[in-house]
Amino acid sequence: MKAQVFYTSLKLGKNENLLKKLERLVLVAGLETLDFKNKFVAIKIHFGEPGNLAYLRPNYARKIVDLIKRNDGRPFLTDCNTLYVGRRKNGLDHLEAAYENGYNPFQTGCHVIIGDGIKGLDVEEVPINLEYVEKAKIGKALYEADIIISMNHFKGHDLAGFGGALKNLGMGGAARAGKAEIHASGKPFVVEERCEACGQCRKRCAEEAISLSPKAKINHELCLGCGYCISYCPYDAIRTDWQESSANMNRKVAEYTYAILKDKPHFHISFVLDVSPNCDCNRLNDIPIVGDIGFLASFDPVALDQACLDLVNSKPLNPTYESKGKDHFKSLYPHTFGEAGLEHAEGIGLGTRKYRLVEL
């Protein structure tokens, strides 16, 4: 069976603006068929690393918030803290970055909740027992939500190849320890010049794999690679190895998406505009690789990502970038294998890559 993916371009008709087009799209796609009444609704979105201007405008989020409230739902905007050291690595800095970029209750009509808390330790371990992940470590706010709505900015990514619904949920919804599991094929290590020998990591290591002599050291024979020490360290002295292959990283993202959506109603909206070569995590966004395409929506995140990928690759690549084949993202990042995540997501029953594009 083909999944339905609904699409509208950014071309405006008479007496209609982009927010009205977005509303019409999601209503035709079936958003209001979900039972929102008195339900906590997590709207998973990327607030944008300050400096990057390609992130989604908060006006779009406000439109979805208003529709959910109209149906008596209780929406909140959420994202989890980053693994890398930046403006969104902890809950307080993350909130400031979100507010700076317009994601605040006054602009969006709902609260912002950092999914894994102040230090990235508000975590729920979801047993899934799939090929790469046994227990997914996801932000507790996402776990406790009754309904998941993803609002995805479709763009490039230097490790994943591209980012859409799967990456927004699977990578973005992972707690810091979960992000370490997704990115790493090895185990955490200590940057000694940053270590202050405070002992916070040692006190909280369940496997007693960390010693102080005098700086922290991790015994990889005892370490399980859970990644929690990365979140506990107040000095950012414990790092992941960042050595996972692009294909396996994307497969883990698919499995984390499975964990987040497991047993929950969900709906997905993708914005194929300002298609930057860089993720919104990057403080720089650069020239879009193709022209703006439009809005898409579906109940199937796999079909949605496949449709977005196909639409981007059907457009001419911006001549600023060198084309090396039919896949524009592979042209930008030849070492990536983004479609591995789509193949794996289909294989674990998250959705289908076969779709019927319904244009409004």
Image (spheres, grey):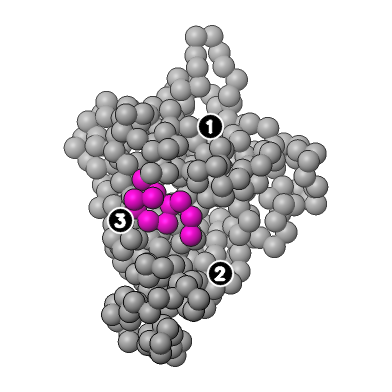
Question: How far apart in space, not on screen, are marks 2 and 3 (Cα)?
Answer: 23 Å
State which mark lies toward you, 1 or 2: 2
Q: Where is residue 298 drawn, in percent x and y?
A: 46, 39
**Residue shown at the point (62%, 39%) measured from the top left:** 275
One can see residue 312 in this view: no
Q: Amino acid at mark 1?
A: Phe
Q: Residue furthest top?
A: 14
Question: How far apart in space, not on screen, are marks 1 and 2 (Cα)?
Answer: 33 Å
For mark 2, give the secondary structure. loop
What crowding class fits label 3: few (fewer than 14 Cα within 10 Å), some (14-19), or many (20 or more)?
A: many
Say above or below: 360 vs 156.
above
| Span of residues in magenta | 85-95
Q: Is residue 190 left or right of residue 158?
A: left
In primary-sequence order, the first of circles 3 and 1 is 3
Where residue 174 sits, quadrant-wise, is bottom left
Dot 3 corresponds to which residue? 117
In primary-sequence order, the first of circles 1 and 2 is 2
Q: Residue furthest left?
A: 38
Q: Where is residue 198 drawn, in percent x and y?
A: 34, 77
Identify which residue, 242 or 86, lies in the foreground.
86
Q: Is residue 151 left or right of residue 142?
A: right
Q: Amino acid at mark 2?
A: Trp
In primary-sequence order, the first of circles 2 and 3 is 3
CB within 8 Å, label 3 to label 1: no
For mark 1, give the secondary structure. strand
Asked if residue 240 is among those painted magenta in the image, a careful observer would answer: no
Q: Where is residue 336 drawn, in percent x and y?
A: 66, 60
Where residue 343 sits, quadrant-wise, is bottom right
Dot 1 corresponds to which residue? 295
